[in-house]
């Protein structure tokens, strides 16, 4: 096996850095909403009807940004993994990057699955109860369910942020894998 063969991988480094940053941006967005934004919206001084309006706006803006960023990272890590797989026999660099990039890809997929399984149902529930409170600010049952879902959302957002953190860490590590580790 040649040291790097025909595969120098020089062009991968900037792409890997951008992909790692995309996972970091997603991690930061999800991670900061849980300990910062959501607790502010849970304050007793913030009436649930207004918290619902703010949260509905926040979710709408997040829906327009974060899925695209995660999709970019997921597809890029998949493409880079496939390229490294195809070049693994002729390049130490590719063979060393492959498991790291594939790990980043799996973390991206895990974050997407986590979102569909745990986050989207809570997002939709909070939207539903926010709308009910907007239509009837005295609806105590909707307020109670909205507040319950807020608490659940915070916990699940930390799980999603952790997966994104691992994707970002693997992506950053892959930038430094250069084919010198294999003997």
Image: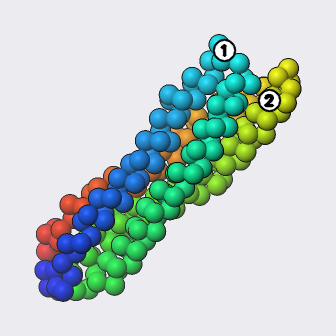
Quarter-of-image position of residue 54: top right
Q: Earlier in the sequence, mark 2 or mark 1?
A: 1
Q: Position of residue 46 (x, y in %)?
A: 66, 18
Q: Give how far apart the Cα atoms at labels 2 and 1 are.
A: 17 Å
Q: Position of residue 68 (x, y in %)?
A: 51, 58
Q: Which residue is more in the foreground, 153 or 132?
A: 132
Give me the residue at 18% from left, 68% from top: 178
**Callout 2–callout 1 Cβ contact below 8 Å:** no
Which residue has dot 1 on it?
44
Q: Name the image quarter holding the C terminus.
A: bottom left
Q: Name the image quarter holding the N terminus.
A: bottom left
Find numbered disc 2 in the image and state the secondary structure of the residue it sits on: helix
Which residue has dot 2 on it?
134
Q: From the viewer's perspective, tell me whether residue 150 is left or right of residue 98.
A: right
Q: Position of residue 161 (x, y in %)?
A: 48, 44
Give me the residue at 73% from left, 39% from top: 127
From the viewer's perspective, is residue 6 above or below residue 41?
A: below
Assess disc 2: are there few (<14), some (14-19) or many (≥20) residues with their C-alpha within 10 Å of its C-alpha: some
Instruction: Examine the rendering and report whether any part of residue 177 can be seen.
Output: yes
Q: Which residue is more in the foreground, 67 or 112?
A: 67
Instruction: Examine the rendering and report whether any part of residue 174 can be seen.
Output: no
Assess disc 1: are there few (<14), some (14-19) or many (≥20) residues with their C-alpha within 10 Å of its C-alpha: few
What colour-coding does the image apply? rainbow
* Direction top: furthest residue: 45
């Amino acid at each position: 096996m040649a040291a790097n063969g025909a595969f120098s991988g020089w062009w991968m480094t900037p792409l890997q850095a951008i992909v790692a940053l995309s996972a970091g941006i997603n991690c930061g967005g999800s991670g900061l909403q849980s300990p910062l934004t959501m607790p502010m919206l849970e304050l007793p001084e913030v009436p649930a009807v207004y918290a619902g309006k703010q949260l509905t706006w926040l979710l709408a803006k997040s829906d327009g940004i974060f899925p695209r960023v995660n999709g970019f990272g997921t597809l890029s890590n998949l493409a880079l993994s496939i390229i490294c797989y195809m070049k693994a026999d002729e390049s130490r660099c590719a063979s060393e990057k492959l498991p790291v990039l594939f790990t980043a890809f799996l973390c991206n997929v895990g974050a997407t699955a986590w979102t569909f399984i745990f986050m989207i149902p809570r997002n939709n529930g909070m939207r539903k109860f926010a709308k009910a409170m907007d239509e009837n600010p005295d609806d105590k049952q909707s307020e109670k369910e909205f507040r319950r879902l807020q608490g659940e959302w915070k916990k699940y957002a930390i799980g999603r942020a952790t997966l994104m953190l691992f994707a970002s860490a693997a992506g950053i590590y892959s930038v430094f894998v250069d084919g010198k580790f294999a003997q």
